Image (spheres, helix red, strand yellow):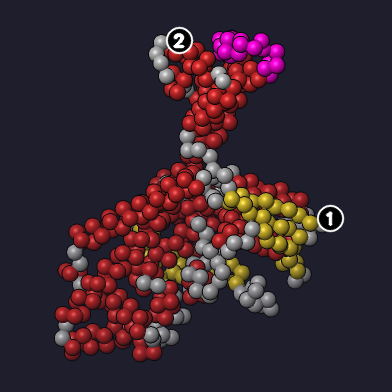
């Protein structure tokens, strides 16, 4: 699966999970209702592209990706569940785009896997990270492996070489009944897959942990993956270098000399606290020169020596500044990417909360409608819903289902039949969804503030 198809796959997974929450409240109820039936669900095409991390200009390419994903087969029923057999299933059994809406058909086995119904100690990919942060397909798989360990409190985990290759979906072929890996030698796998994934994770400041990998044996037979809490950078690059420079000036007793120099240069007081990024780096450059000569400076002449450095080294600083600028540009790109990631995380959290709120509102409207019916009318409605369920899904006969599943069937029947269209207060629903968005935004702000304080 290519990185682009992985984005599409993840968008389908998230859209499916939101659909289930809105229509069935929870995964267990959805399973009770759906059983072995094929599920077709819908999602606005623009919203689906956003979840993929694609801009509007890429929607035609996204359509091609959905079409390609329709052809992809995955190996099913292996690993810890059934080592003696193998099966292959299409990830999606059908898809169409009509009037700005994407409809996706998913077979029951795939649906259960995507909803994590089998009780896996599994973590759905953090879609916003995968779709916005990393272009390769191995980093997100390795990240998921590390994230599972991190959340389970496992700071050091041991893997076999084949085990970790399987975990990150390093491709292989079956030759004469045996697996033949695409990257046969460990050093190739390490360079092309593992080392790259570790570097990507460690350079991503929006992740809580750093990763260290240690190998055992020649040839390598065991890999230890270690995790440790990541140090975070200050939010503003200029604030960071300013803090470093001011602290260093204080430690050397040279703050007054620097203040006098820049106050004279700009003709007003407090200039030292209002310098540009280049100027703070220039002061840092001059301090390095000062420290190199500190043993030869006559006592009492320290301030004058720094002032002379500040006056005479601007030309020599230019090539140094060019290199610093390159480094700053890379870091600014990283911070820009982190902002994109944050915004997409926020948007996906809003979608999930909206699905929950909309489902709860629809349930309240249907409950109000049912309460207004006479007992005979209510029973007649339930019988019609049960008949529709039994016809569409004989594997899940209405009378044999738990009460929560029966309620979901009746609720969806009422909604799909348009019986409560006049009762749905669109203005109120809009307010509820707006309040849900605001609550999610507030939670994100609080979490960001907590992370800032902790670091």
Residue 145 shows in the view: no
Residue at 51 percent across and 70 percent down: it is 116
Residue situated in front as seen by the camera: 130 or 361: 361
Residue topped by disc 2: 264
Determine which of the numbered discs, if any, sits on residue 218 in the image. Answer: 1
Residue at 75 percent across and 71 percent down: it is 177
Q: Which image quarter: residue 51?
A: bottom left
Helix, strand, or loop for circle 1? loop
Residue at 20 percent across and 67 percent down: it is 424
Q: Earlier in the sequence, mark 2 or mark 1?
A: 1
Helix, strand, or loop for circle 2? helix
Task: Give left or right: position of 373 versus 187.
Answer: left
* Place of residue 93 in the rendered image (x, y in percent of width and height, measured from the top left): 48, 69
* Place of residue 205 in the rendered image (x, y in percent of width and height, measured from the top left): 54, 45
* Place of residue 9 in the rendered image (x, y in percent of width and height, measured from the top left): 50, 60
Q: Which image quarter: residue 204?
A: top right
Residue situated in front as seen by the camera: 76 or 262: 262
How many C-alpha atoms fall within 10 Å of the one at disc 1: few (<14), some, or many (≥20)?
few
Task: Tell me the CA gap for discs 2 and 1.
Answer: 65 Å
Task: Give left or right: position of 286 versus 106.
Answer: right
């Amino acid at each position: 699966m290519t990185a682009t198809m992985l984005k599409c796959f993840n968008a389908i997974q998230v859209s499916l999970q939101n659909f289930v929450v809105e229509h069935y409240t929870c995964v267990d109820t959805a399973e009770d209702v759906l059983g072995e039936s094929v599920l077709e669900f819908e999602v606005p095409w623009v919203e689906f592209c956003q979840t993929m991390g694609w801009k509007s200009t890429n929607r035609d390419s996204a359509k091609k990706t959905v079409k390609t994903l329709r052809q992809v087969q995955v190996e099913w029923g292996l690993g810890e569940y059934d080592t003696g057999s193998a099966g292959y299933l299409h990830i999606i059994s059908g898809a169409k785009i009509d009037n700005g809406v994407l409809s996706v058909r998913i077979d029951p086995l795939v649906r259960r896997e995507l909803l994590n119904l089998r009780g896996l100690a599994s973590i759905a990919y953090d879609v916003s990270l995968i779709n916005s942060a990393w272009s390769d397909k191995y980093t997100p798989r390795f990240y998921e492996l590390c994230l599972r360990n991190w959340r389970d409190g496992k700071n050091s985990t041991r893997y076999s070489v084949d085990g970790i290759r399987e975990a990150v979906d390093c491709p292989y072929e079956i030759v004469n009944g045996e697996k033949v890996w695409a990257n046969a030698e460990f050093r190739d796998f390490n360079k092309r897959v593992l080392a790259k994934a570790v570097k990507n994770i460690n350079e991503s400041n929006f992740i809580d942990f750093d990763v260290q990998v240690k190998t055992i044996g020649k040839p390598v037979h065991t890999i230890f993956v270690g995790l440790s809490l990541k140090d975070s950078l200050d939010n503003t690059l200029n604030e960071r270098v300013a803090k470093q420079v001011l602290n260093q000036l204080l430690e050397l007793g040279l703050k007054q000399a620097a203040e006098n120099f820049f106050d004279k240069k700009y003709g007003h007081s407090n200039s030292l606290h209002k310098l540009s990024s280049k100027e703070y780096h220039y002061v840092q450059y001059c301090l390095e020169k000062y420290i190199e000569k500190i043993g030869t400076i006559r006592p009492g002449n320290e301030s004058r020596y720094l002032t002379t450095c500040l006056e005479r080294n601007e030309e020599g600083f230019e090539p140094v500044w060019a290199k610093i600028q390159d480094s700053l540009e890379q870091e600014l790109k990283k911070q820009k990417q982190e902002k994109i990631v944050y915004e997409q995380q926020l948007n996906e959290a809003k979608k999930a909360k909206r699905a929950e709120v909309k489902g709860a509102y629809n349930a309240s409207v249907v409950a109000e409608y049912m309460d207004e019916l006479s007992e005979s009318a209510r029973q007649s409605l339930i019988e019609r819903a049960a008949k529709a369920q039994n016809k569409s899904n004989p594997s899940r006969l209405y009378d044999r289902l738990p009460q929560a599943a029966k309620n979901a069937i009746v609720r969806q029947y009422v909604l799909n039949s348009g019986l409560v269209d006049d009762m749905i207060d669109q203005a109120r629903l809009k307010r509820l969804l707006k309040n849900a968005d605001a609550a999610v935004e507030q939670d994100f702000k609080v979490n960001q503030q907590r992370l800032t304080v902790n670091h």
